[in-house]
Image: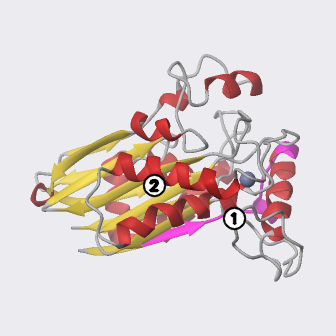
């Protein structure tokens, strides 16, 4: 089994975010995350926004994260908070993503065979314990993240997909299965108010935030490992090579195998730069992460 991966923040500079809103979001995210790199930052429960210290002017923040270990891969994509929205949380999106990943990977590194939904529910609850003292976890705009997990366990491949970071599996007979949680693409409207109302609701979509029951709304299943050839886990900033820019999932996997994850991301960012303004819903540029597991 061989694992390769790449993770890149959204481009900035001359090819960077094209809209004022995107620039605002990015500068806000950068400010938040820089705050967490300060030398006074200690990862203690209830840690307040730490002092600024090691600022890197212009540093790009990646709100995606990939963590891999012996027999598992976890990919997360934090949802960038819209400018001006009060989330009730003193932490950055990148903090939430990192803390969720930390809580999820401790049992996975330890070889846990618990159902992935249980592990995710416990991680969401655990993150809530870490910042419940400083932050209003009842705020509907609390930071949130996608979570996708694949794990080898007893000759099988378990998967879990919560929100729009798909898992793509190719079988040895060349059939392709895409586990794609598209509920966030099917909302009746996308105003701030509507998304707030529909997040973690049965009529809307589910993401990892403050409600542990979201874990049981994920798409989860298990497949015979010996039937599988490759598995890819991608955030939507990378999966758009197929679901926005029209390549087949088979082409995406072939590109990953032949050229590697970094080349897929390079091509997606080039397509993002060339896309006509306003043609697609959602951000022009996004953080992009790909993990490719050859089984
Ligand atoms: Zn918080």
Alpha carbon separation for disc pair 1 and 2: 31 Å
- Position in image of residue 43 (x %, y %): 69, 72
| Number of the label disc, if any, that sits on residue 45 | 1
**Which residue is painted at 71% across and 48% down in the image?**
80
Number of callouts: 2
Judge by depth and name the residue closer to the eye, 237 or 145.
145
Q: Tell which of 112 and 258 is nearer to you.
A: 112
> Circle 2 sits on which residue?
234
Q: Is residue 127 left or right of residue 231?
A: right
Crowdedness near tag 2: few (<14), some (14–19) or many (≥20) residues, C-alpha within 10 Å? many
- Tell me if residue 12 is in the magenta stretch: yes
**SS class, disc 2:** strand
Q: Nearer the viewer, residue 221 or 235?
A: 221
Q: Position of residue 292 (x, y in %)?
A: 36, 65
Tell whether 57 sits left or right of 278. Answer: right
Q: Give the residue at x 72% y 65%.
A: 61
Q: Position of residue 202 (x, y in %)?
A: 50, 21
Q: Which residues are magenta?
A: 5-21
In the figure, residue 209 lies in which quadrant?
A: top right
* Quarter holding residue 33: bottom right
**Dot 1 surroundings within 10 Å: few (below 14), some, or many (20 or more)?**
few
Q: Quadrant of the C terminus?
A: bottom left
For the question of whether residue 210 can be seen, the reply is yes
Which numbered mark, 1 or 2, is in the foreground of this view? 1
Residue drawn 12% across and 62% down?
155
């Amino acid at each position: 089994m061989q694992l390769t991966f790449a993770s890149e923040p959204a481009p900035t500079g001359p090819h960077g975010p094209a809209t004022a809103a995107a620039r605002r979001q990015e500068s806000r995210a950068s400010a938040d995350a820089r705050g967490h790199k300060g030398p006074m930052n200690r990862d203690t429960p209830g840690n307040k926004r730490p002092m600024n210290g090691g600022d890197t002017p212009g540093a790009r923040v990646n709100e995606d994260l990939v963590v891999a270990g012996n027999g598992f891969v976890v990919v997360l994509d934090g949802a960038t908070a819209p400018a001006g929205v009060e989330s009730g949380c003193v932490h950055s999106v990148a903090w939430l993503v990192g803390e969720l990943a930390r809580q999820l990977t401790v049992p996975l590194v330890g070889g846990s065979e618990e159902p992935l939904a249980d592990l995710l529910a416990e991680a969401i609850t655990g993150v809530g314990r870490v910042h419940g003292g400083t932050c209003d976890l009842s705020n509907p705009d609390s930071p949130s993240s996608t979570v996708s997990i694949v794990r080898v366990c007893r000759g099988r491949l378990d998967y879990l997909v919560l929100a729009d970071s798909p898992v793509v599996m190719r079988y040895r007979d060349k059939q392709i299965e895409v586990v794609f949680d598209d509920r966030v693409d099917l909302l009746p409207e996308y105003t701030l108010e509507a998304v707030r109302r529909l997040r973690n609701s049965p009529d809307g979509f589910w993401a990892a935030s403050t409600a542990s029951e979201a874990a049981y709304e994920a798409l989860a299943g298990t497949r015979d490992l010996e039937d599988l050839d490759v598995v890819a886990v991608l955030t939507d900033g990378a999966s758009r090579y197929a679901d926005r820019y029209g390549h087949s999932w088979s082409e995406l996997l072939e590109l990953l195998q032949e050229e590697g994850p970094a080349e897929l991301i390079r091509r997606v960012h080039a397509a993002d730069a060339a896309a006509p303004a306003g043609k697609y819903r959602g951000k022009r540029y996004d953080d992009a992460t790909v993990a490719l597991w050859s089984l």
